[in-house]
Amino acid sequence: MIAAQQLDLVEYIASLRPVPPEVVPDHVRQLLPPRPAHWRRLVSDIPMDETYAYATPTWTGVAVDVIRHLTGADMLCRDGTVTRYQGGYGRRYRLVLMSLPDAIALNERWPLLPRQDAQEYWPLLTFATTDQIDRTDTRTLLQEMMGEPV
């Protein structure tokens, strides 16, 4: 009897599979604004978990995308040129710069969540791991940043 229970326990443990961490589905990448081929190659290995929407009320549209990494930052300009800046960041990640109305529209297509630990002046918006999340708080935050009544 004990041997049978031990065998059942061993079979049960063997049947357990590790639960993979929740990640942002890769198809969300297609919701981002189109970029030139040379830039898409640069960002192709940055997972969506390390891609953030960065919307500000003062966005000029000159810079449209940034890759921050250990030795500095690469910035994609609206005209397709890439400018490299020296400096350093603790890890490699991507910022997709956009206007507040564009961020609101993107939030309607896929939920964005403010990243609480971000050290930016304006909130970094992460992409949710599922589209089954209430978008109201983020929409309200972005509308308040625009100065719109909520």
Image: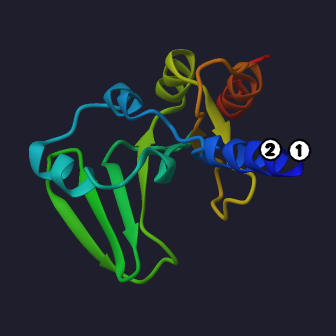
What secondary structure is marked by label 1? Answer: loop
Q: Residues within 10 Å of mark 1 (few under 14, many from 20)?
A: few
Q: Residue at x 22, y 66 (%)?
A: 83
Horizontal and vertical percent position of residue 22: 59, 41
Residue denoted by label 1: 1
Q: Which mark is residue 143?
A: none
Horizontal and vertical percent position of residue 99: 47, 33
Q: Residue at x 44, y 82 (%)?
A: 88
Q: Residue at x 34, y 50 (%)?
A: 65
Kind of residue at disc 1: Met
Taking the view exactly as shown, the residue that stands out farthest to the right is 2
106, 59: nearer the viewer: 106
Horizontal and vertical percent position of residue 105: 50, 18
What secondary structure is marked by label 2? Answer: helix
Q: Which mark is residue 4?
A: 2
Q: Label 1 vs label 2: CA separation?
A: 5 Å
